[in-house]
Amino acid sequence: MPFVSIAQTKKIKDLENERKVLKNEILEINSLLINNSKKKKNAFNDLESLTYKINKSETLIKLTNDQINLLNFEVEKNEDKIYKLNVEIIAARKDYSDMIFNSYKSRLKENRLMFLLSAENFLQAFKRSQYFEQFSKNRKEMALSIQTKVGTVKKIIDTLKTKISEKDSLINFNLSEKKILSNEKKEQNNLIRSLRKRESAYKKQINDKQRQASLLDKEIDRLIKEAIKESNKNSSLSTFSLTPEAKALAESFSKNKGKLPWPVERGVIIQKFGLQSHPVVKTTKIKSNGIVIATTKNANIRSVFNGKVLSILKFKGSNLTVLIQHGNYISVYKNLSKVYVNKGQNVESFDIIGEVFSSNSESKTTLQFSIFNNTTALDPYLWIAK
């Protein structure tokens, strides 16, 4: 039973931590996307931003419901404990009362000496003496047991009050969030209706962006393969040939998986890694070799680890891209307007390498961030600190 309780408590704490992360993400979406959308008045971007927030809000409400259900279980379990302990206390008090009454009735205290002296031999007298000692001990233990159980009940009642208060607070939070979500969904539906006639144009716009992103990814792949070829003295190996120092750097990078700093000081992930449906035009698939982070206008871009600038890419139709090598790992930073480093330059973690591109016409400012192991794209979300 204690193990179940510890497991339940851990689940509740884990859910609370997830809720905190989501609440912070929603605050960032409001700050970085929603508020800016209202200023720019771009219906499609407004709908994208609102959809990101609605998805996060729905997840937050679900997590809160899960936490409420776990707290309900805890409350019921504590109520059951209190009931069982109260039954035990009533029974123990009755036994204790009976013991005291029988002791008084038989006047054991007054007759103790006579009881001992009337023994037929020493052994019988010794056994009678032990009986008195055991009786006294049992009485003390029973009294202590009752006192302990009463104390336990008080502690459980205090815990119960805390759990009920937490549950009520979460229920009120969810009611408030559901009202906000309901209004946002109405706004979302209005925007969808207004954009329905132009859906084919938006599909084309998304597909054009995907084609441009694919061309840029091919160019990044070419640059990495060239660097691999150069490290192997033009042989056909498909992985970097590393010096002992570069190997140590790669190992250090790998050990920091899940702990790497974000490439921006403030941001929220608005596009995940891999193949996925577009958040607004669900019939359109988009593929990403990294993650897209919405950030503040003109935000500084930081290196996520020590390394060397492998390349600075200016590709037709795209903004600046920086590739930083960390042994056989490469971190890639796309959509920069300015770059403050040079090819071959050594950089350290948190060094500012450039500035993100901020469009006057767009309601959001984004950085596309990728991580590669040789030429294999990895999910950056698994590498950066949560």
Image (cartoon, rainbow, N blue to C red):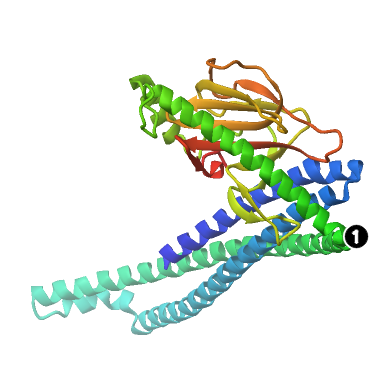
Amino acid found under the numbered disc labelled 1? Ser
Q: Position of residue 103 (x, y in %)?
A: 36, 79
Residue 137 vs residue 76, the one in the foreground: 76
Q: Position of residue 44 (x, y in %)?
A: 84, 51
Residue 138 vs residue 212, the one in the foreground: 212
Q: Is residue 8 above or below residue 273?
A: below
The image quarter containing residue 190 is: bottom right
Residue 386 vs residue 233, the one in the foreground: 233
Horizontal side of 35 relative to 163 (left or right) equals right
Helix, strand or loop under label 1: helix
Number of numbered labels in the structure image: 1
The image quarter containing residue 62 is: bottom right
Residue 264 seen: no
Q: Quadrant of the N terminus?
A: bottom left
Q: Is residue 162 above or below residue 210?
A: below
Q: Is residue 97 above or below residue 373?
A: below
User: Which class describes the residues within 10 Å of circle 1: few (<14), some (14-19), or many (20+)?
Assistant: few
Q: Position of residue 75 (x, y in %)?
A: 59, 69
Residue under the image location 66 percent in, 47 percent down: 271
Residue 310 seen: yes
Horizontal side of 300 relative to 350 (left or right) equals right
Residue under the image location 50 percent in, 23 percent down: 306
**Residue annotated with mark 1:** 194
Residue under the image location 26 percent in, 69 percent down: 133
Q: Position of residue 161 (x, y in %)?
A: 64, 64
